């Protein structure tokens, strides 16, 4: 499978999100699922998926530290699209985490907190699948700049699919408005990127859209997305 994906990767760059999703569902069936934190991009991806297939899997990493607005949006998604979100949790409850690792782990060791509440739960979920679909975009962070629309995920050992990799924020919001797609109410309150309550703040004028994530530290990713550079097309370096 890894070799097949590497051969397909360059070709898939010309595909629309709809075609990428259609290929994903036809190729992997119930062994592929969309992963979503229900940001603006995530909502666009879910809406497009609903137009491609009436039966797709959707899961989220519920850290149990999400904003009330995020939980409200999850309820809207289930009602609007007629699906049940598969909620994946840490093996430790928040209370158990405090007891084992000390209170407010996200302040002392944010990488460890993300690992316990997001990375390891994701690893368990992906062990059930042959492929996963995300809504990451290349222009979000430097570490995502090399994301392919279809690629092999070395970290987790399965196919990773990013249908919106070449989109920008303007395209995302144009789609939301054109299709009346629901979105997180926090976006209207200067939260362009939304994670856990403890590690997310509103963005000030002039700041980078992800400046509100892990503010005050050098951390920019939770560890879910380790991107390999896109392959160089044959003859490109000639």
Image: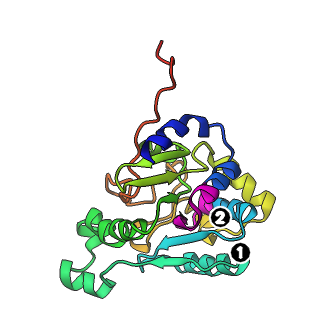
Residue 133, given in percent of the width and then of the height, sits at 54, 58
Residue at image location 56% in from the left, 75% down from the top: 70
Element carrying mark 2: helix
Residue 176, given in percent of the width and then of the height, sits at 73, 59
68 lies left or right of 229: right
Q: What's the image's color scheme?
A: rainbow
Q: Mark 2 vs mark 1: which is more N-terminal?
A: 2
What whole-number distance in Å separates the C-alpha atoms at marks 2 and 1?
A: 9 Å
- Outermost residue on the top side: it is 238
User: Label 2 neighbourhood size at 10 Å, few (<14), some (14-19), many (20+)?
Assistant: many
Residue 41 lies in the magenta stretch: yes
Label ID, residue 117: none
Q: Is 208 in front, or is 29? A: 29
Residue at image location 21% in from the left, 85% down from the top: 99
Residue 187 lies in the magenta stretch: no
Q: Is residue 122 above or below residue 137?
A: below
Q: Is 92 in front, or is 94? A: 92
233 lies left or right of 123: right
Q: Could you say which quadrant of the image residue 122 lies in?
A: bottom left
Q: Is 18 in front, or is 116? A: 18
Q: What residue would you read off at disc 1?
A: 81
Q: Is residue 179 above or below residue 117?
A: above
Q: What residue would you read off at disc 2?
A: 46
User: Label 1 neighbourhood size at 10 Å, few (<14), some (14-19), many (20+)?
Assistant: some
Which segment is the magenta one? 24-42
Element carrying mark 1: helix
Residue at image location 52% in from the left, 77% down from the top: 86
Residue 144, given in percent of the width and then of the height, sits at 46, 45
Circles 2, 1 touching at the beta carbon (< 8 Å): yes
């Amino acid at each position: 499978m890894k070799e097949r994906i590497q051969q397909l990767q360059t070709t898939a760059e010309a595909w629309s999100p709809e075609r990428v999703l259609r290929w994903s569902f036809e190729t992997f069936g119930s062994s592929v699922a969309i992963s979503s934190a229900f940001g603006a991009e995530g909502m666009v991806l879910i809406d497009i998926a609903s137009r491609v297939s009436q039966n797709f899997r959707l899961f989220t990493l519920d850290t149990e530290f999400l904003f009330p607005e995020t939980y409200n949006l999850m309820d809207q998604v289930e009602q609007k699209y007629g699906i049940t979100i598969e909620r994946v949790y840490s093996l430790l409850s928040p209370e158990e985490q405090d007891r084992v690792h000390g209170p407010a782990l996200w302040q002392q060791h944010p990488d460890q907190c993300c690992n316990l509440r997001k990375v390891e739960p994701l690893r368990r979920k992906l062990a059930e699948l042959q492929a996963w679909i995300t809504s990451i975009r290349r222009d979000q962070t430097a570490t995502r700049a090399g994301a392919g629309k279809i690629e092999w995920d070395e970290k987790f050992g399965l196919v990773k699919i990013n249908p919106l990799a070449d989109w920008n924020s303007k395209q995302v919001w144009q789609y939301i408005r054109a299709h009346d797609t629901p979105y997180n109410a926090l976006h209207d309150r200067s939260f362009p990127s939304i994670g856990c309550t403890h590690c997310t703040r509103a963005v000030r004028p002039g700041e980078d859209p992800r400046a509100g994530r892990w503010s005050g530290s050098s951390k920019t990713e939770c560890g879910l997305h380790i991107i390999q550079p896109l392959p160089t097309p044959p003859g490109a370096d000639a």
